[in-house]
Image: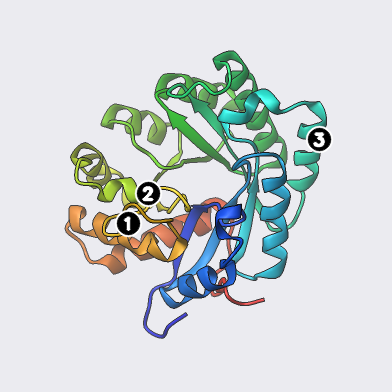
Amino acid sequence: MSPGLPHLIDTHCHIQTEEFDADRDAVLERAAEAGVGTLIVVGGAGDLSTNDKAVSLTEEHAGLYATVGMHPHDAKDVDAEDMDRLRNLAAHPKVVAIGETGLDFHYDNSPREVQREMFERFAGLAVETRLPIVVHNRESDREVAETIRGRGGGTLRGVIHCFTSDQAAARSFLDLGFYLSFSGIVTFKNADGLRDVARRVPLDRLLIETDAPFLAPVPKRGRRNEPAWVRYVAETLAQVRGVGIDEITDAASRNARTLFGLPSGETAEES
């Protein structure tokens, strides 16, 4: 990590996927040079093998951590054997959360009842393993909140990743003790409503992410996203909140370490 740069954490990226096969080491080097010293590589970004790949990457790089789960798009493909495999992976010392999981009522790539059932099962696994949960939510605010509220007697904790809902939904999830994570979407020209939500989120409940390779921020829109660009998200949040970027990066990194139990001082390029 370059001297003088704050320690940033990209709390949600998918650098284990094939989009990064040709230049993954270079991507990690650029992240470290940009001050992004810790990455959470999120499993379930496609088929089940993306979880194994995420965990394997963490064994090669000190600053990488993983989550294990399955995206709601693929909930229909998860069986009992898969759940046992993911439960075993969750015991790995560098797995810091369950997910991503949740509900997506925009695309409905899996039937909604199947999505709900699988989300319930992953929520149960998070409670069982005492790990936080990484939640995907699209056009399903009420149902996601109901599932969170109904699991673990209030012990379920986690983050709504790539938050894009309104202020009412934000308040609902914050009241449940969850963090809200903002991605490159908050930099988009048509995201005034989301920026207004981001302005109001308590600083101690805010996270930042890329969701790489998706959702590249302004001024990189249209390109493959990568963890180094999480800085643009932090800069936008600092602008809309009227504070210095150090205040955002310090708070977001502190929040990530608190939620995911991360140590400080590591960098993703170390091995």
Q: Position of residue 29 (x, y in %)?
A: 52, 75
Q: With respect to residue 250, does 190 lie above or below?
A: above
Q: Earlier in the sequence, mark 3 or mark 1?
A: 3
* Residue contact at pointers 3 and 1, CB within 8 angstroms: no
Q: Is residue 53 left or right of residue 1?
A: right
Q: Quadrant of residue 84?
A: top right
Residue highlighted by disc 2: 183
Q: Residues within 10 Å of mark 2 (few under 14, many from 20)?
A: many
Of callouts 2 and 3, which one flags the residue occurring earlier in the amino acid sequence? 3
For label 1, the crowd category at 10 Å Cα-Cα, with few meaning under 14, some 14 to 19 and many 20 or more, is many
Q: Amino acid at mark 3?
A: Asp
Amino acid carrying mark 2 in the image: Ser
Q: Secondary structure at mark 1?
A: helix
Q: Is 80 displayed left or right of 165 in the figure? A: right
Q: Are marks 2 and 3 in contact (CB under 8 Å)?
A: no
Callout 3 secondary element: helix
Residue at the (45%, 60%) spot, across then down: 226
Q: Which residue is mark 3?
A: 84
Tell me the residue that label 1 is attached to. Answer: 233
Label at residue 266: none
